Amino acid sequence: MVTLQQVMERLEEDGVLHPAGPYDGRRQVAQVELLGPCTVFRGDTLYLCPEGEHPPERVPEGLDCLLLTRGEHGGMTAVLASGDWTARRVYTQVRAVLEEEATLVEQVNRLYRLLGVTSGLKEVVEAAEEFLHYPVSVCDVSYNMIETSPMMRKLSYGIKRVNAQLVLDSVEIESLQRLQIERKIYENQQAFIVDSEDHPDSRWVFCAIRLQGVVTGYVAVCLPAGAEVTRLDLRFITALAGVCSVEMQKHDFFVTRTGMKYENFLVELLEGRFDDVNLISSRLELLDRKFCRYFCIAVLHCMEPHDSTLFNKHQMAALRAMYPNSMSVVYQDAIVLFLNQDEPILLRERQLAPLREFAQRNRMKVGVSQPFQDILKINAFYGQTINVLRIGETHDPEATLYLATELLPQYLFSNCPYLGLEVGIHHHIFWLQNYDQQYHTEFVHTLRTYLECDRSAAKAAQTLHLHRSTFFYRIKKLEELLGVSMNDSRLLFLYELSFRIWDYLSK
């Protein structure tokens, strides 16, 4: 239902009349009528007094009706008006306002109902196109097209397909920035019209989509040049942006985002949705991030779960200050830091110390992937980081930072089934184990100590508290039992790998 203030503002905006005195703008107006001898009074009706007629002195008890009149009147709540207006003209205008509001409410309710019975924005956008009769799209601030209507997908310019994802091409993004349309999207609370000099044959309507006060995307509607955009159209598009906001709140990423415009694009990268390095490079440049040669991923997991956008925003700002040109995003309940630099990432202590100290201060655990150079493999390295974090917390819960480089065997083993790993242990290890059990010897322990001492006989003998000659006797006997040589480096590597697998399966 429309408030009296909305009605009066529209009448004043259209130049029909001007209020000449105060009124209660909160009053609800459901309909409008011209006063006559057979008028049946209702409390939600705005009554107009025709020229030459006198309004009634009284209304039925219990009703507080509204009367639009030029002069004072005691029988109703009077809304005084000034200007050269006629009751018939005002009647027509008020009817138009009420009908517009009813249409808007009906259509917006339809959009909300679609959210309840469908998954995503597809049907919502299609319904919006059906109402507006123009192409409609929903974009995020990284210039990905979250959803497009059928007519929008047929446009001959501005859209590029990357795998199954539609994105704005670089020319259109540059146009949005150069013409300051992007700035207007961020600044405006309502839908607004743009006649772009880059596309003189069309005009656009934009409206920002906000979550917790942060712009996460926008609605874009394309019209032919010169097409009329009505007040109802603008209000509907503004309401559509609100519906999109509700849908986006269903997804953790949109709820926990912190306002950096590259965040949506970084998530697309982490999920491996791009297969064109040039496109990635150009998109990063347009998102104010330099595309470099060397990459690495760190995932920071809070030991104490929280749900604070302010906390995330503060922590990620601190991380970006420590690692220039990096990017960060809240994704899958963790903070993901993407290192992107021109110099090789060697993960020396000087580079790792700030990250470790940051994690310790904020009670976090952090996993770090191996450095890489092929940006198209980012999804695999993100997966590696997640596994390394899980493995590290299992094997060394007291540590804060876990490097994939130091946990490579465990990472590789975690991708194999138990039986597949077990049959990968060299059969000599099992044979020696059985021999030790039968004859009460210690050949497995001797071999393992020798390998753990970097194949140093002197160091191994000292560790085993054996005389050097006794140790060499054991090694000679072991070689005879297995028919091998302890100088075979390939075989010793297989023994070392077997012991690593053995330890992994024993935990």
Image (tube, rainbow, N blue to C red):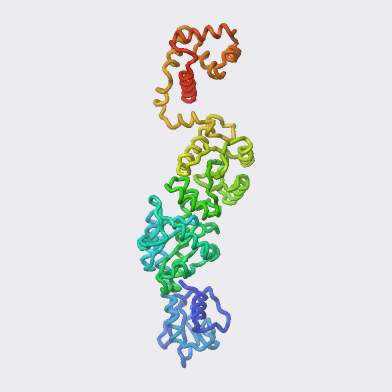
Residue situated furthest bottom in the rendering = 52
For image coordinates 59% across by 40% down, the residue present is 364
The residue positioned 49% from the left and 28% from the top of the image is 409
Residue 127, percent across and down? 37, 63
Q: Please state which of residues 30 and 322 is positioned toward the viewer in this rendering.
A: 322
Q: Is residue 408 left or right of residue 115?
A: right
Foreground residue among 175 and 150 = 175
Q: How many marks?
A: 0
Residue 450, horizontal then vertical, whole percent: 54, 16
Q: Quadrant of the N terminus?
A: bottom left
Q: Residue 432 appears in which quarter of the rendering? A: top left
Tell me which residue sits at (41%, 69%) in the image.
223
Residue name at image x 53 percent, y 32 percent: 405
Against 398, is 106 above or below?
below
Q: Position of residue 232 (x, y in %)?
A: 44, 72
- Nearer the observer, 132 or 484: 484
Q: Is residue 401 visible?
A: yes
Q: Nearer the viewer, residue 351 or 113?
A: 351
Residue 112 locus on image (x, y percent): 42, 61
69 lies above or below 431: below
The answer to whether residue 185 is seen in the rendering is: no
